[in-house]
Image (cartoon, rainbow, N blue to C red):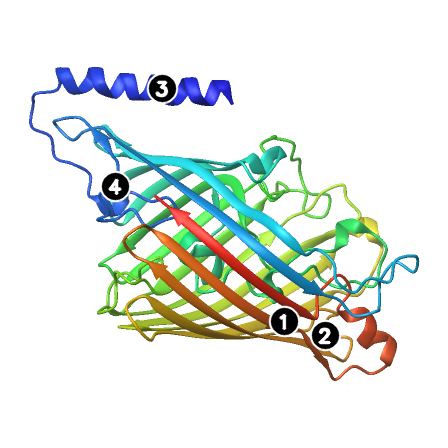
Amino acid sequence: MKKVISFVAYSLLLLNVTTQGADVEYKEIDDKYLESNIVSLDEKKGLSIQTKAGDFLFKPYILVQTAGNFNYYDDEGLNLADQDNIANSGFSIPNALLGFSGRAFKIITFNFALNAAKSGSNLLQQAWFDINLNDAFRIRAGKFKVPYLQAYQVTLGETMFPNLPLSLTSTANVDMSLNATNPTVGTGIDLGLQFHGVVKDKFQYQAAVFNGNGGSLSANKTMSDDHKWLPSLLYATRLAYMPLGVMPSHQGSPSDLENNKLLFAVSANYNVEAEDESSNDFRCGFEASWLYRRFFLSGEFYYLRMNWTNRMQLADEFHLIGGYAQAGYFFTPKLQGALRYDWFNRNGLDKEGYLNSPAACLNYHFVKCNLKLQVMYQYLGKYGHETQLDRDNDDTNLAIHTAIALLQYTF
């Protein structure tokens, strides 16, 4: 932490010295390039430090979330010595982020964020820079979001619900004892290189390659055992069509109640394993979202195929599908209501039975002080299982009733 503080102090000093010596005209990089993936920075003044010429800009930001949690589990999977249906409840800090974004020279924008609520490699929430050659061609390197599904692409502090759909975050319910064979549909943040851009403010593309190990900072990958010519990495792409212009990165904002934007996108990725008793995972999805004044509507459908490595000596594959639909509306310029229906077959297509998770949420924005209060209830239902045992096992480690009250501050 001392090294981080020293680095920030040195950066501020460097900017101050540069300001004194800069007296030439300079064409600034457009502020639309300034991103954080945490809070919106476009057209947000806040605290920023820049040179007179505008060639260097340093804009710090923070996001702090404090939550009250209640989770009720059914009897299956409970410790027999402690039959307590209420678990993982109480107060928590989901995220405590300190970061900065900025621009340098003629083509570089950058972003860096630490998450004090995490540990290990997750302490570094993200760290990347963009080489902005033009709108249609940019190069990003570092630790950042995998381009897959709209639920992950929105800024962390501007989602309609305090948690992601269960279908994206729940591990696949594979009928094996190997921990390495239980991926999630969602991919989150990882370390890699991406080519991306927006063409004519309507077509967006992203093509990237990542380590595929959940954001670990180590370079420990090798070649695939099954595909001799292919490194064991995560390969991802996403293509979006936005007929009414670039879709904002929020899911409804009190500062953006007159907009009209539409988005359709497809995405896919392939995570290649090596030397593991695991699987080569292929994911793909389709998404659609519409921001119309006070309304925000979105839906996604996705597919996961687990192709076992040769080392597993298994002929079958595991297939999982899921999706969700959600809608939000601002009843007043500060109060937003939201509904979501989430559905997935966690135990795979070869078994009968599905999980569904309806949720309702109210969001209140204290617009003059950047506070946001979210109150959500979520229920987990089960239907269509062939046997009672399959029904009981399908929701292992998932709460039947979930209630969250989350208070968030951003700057």
Mark 3–mark 2 Cα distance, whole angstroms, equals: 55 Å
Q: At which x and y percent is residue 370? A: 33, 51
First in sequence, mark 4 or 3: give its number: 3
Q: Which residue is mark 1?
A: 321
Q: Residues within 10 Å of mark 3 (few under 14, many from 20)?
A: few
Residue 87 is situated, as x and y percent measured from the top left of the image, at 74, 58
Q: Amino acid at mark 1?
A: Ile
The residue where tag 4 is placed is 46
**Between 68 and 168, which is closer to the camera in this rendering?**
68
**Amino acid type of the residue that numbered disc 2 sits on in the rendered structure:** Leu
Which residue appears at 73% of the width and 56% of the height? 182
Mark 3 — residue?
Answer: 9
Mark 4 closeness class: few <14, some 14–19, many ≥20 residues within 10 Å: few
* Label ID, residue 349: 2
Q: How far is disc 2 from disc 1 in space, using C-alphas?
A: 8 Å
Q: Amino acid at mark 4?
A: Gly
**Residue at screen point 32% across, 43% down:** 138
Closer to the chain start, of discs 3 and 2, is: 3
Mark 1 nearby-residue class (10 Å; few <14, some 14–19, many ≥20) = many
Camera-side residue: 236 or 370? 370
Element at label 1: strand
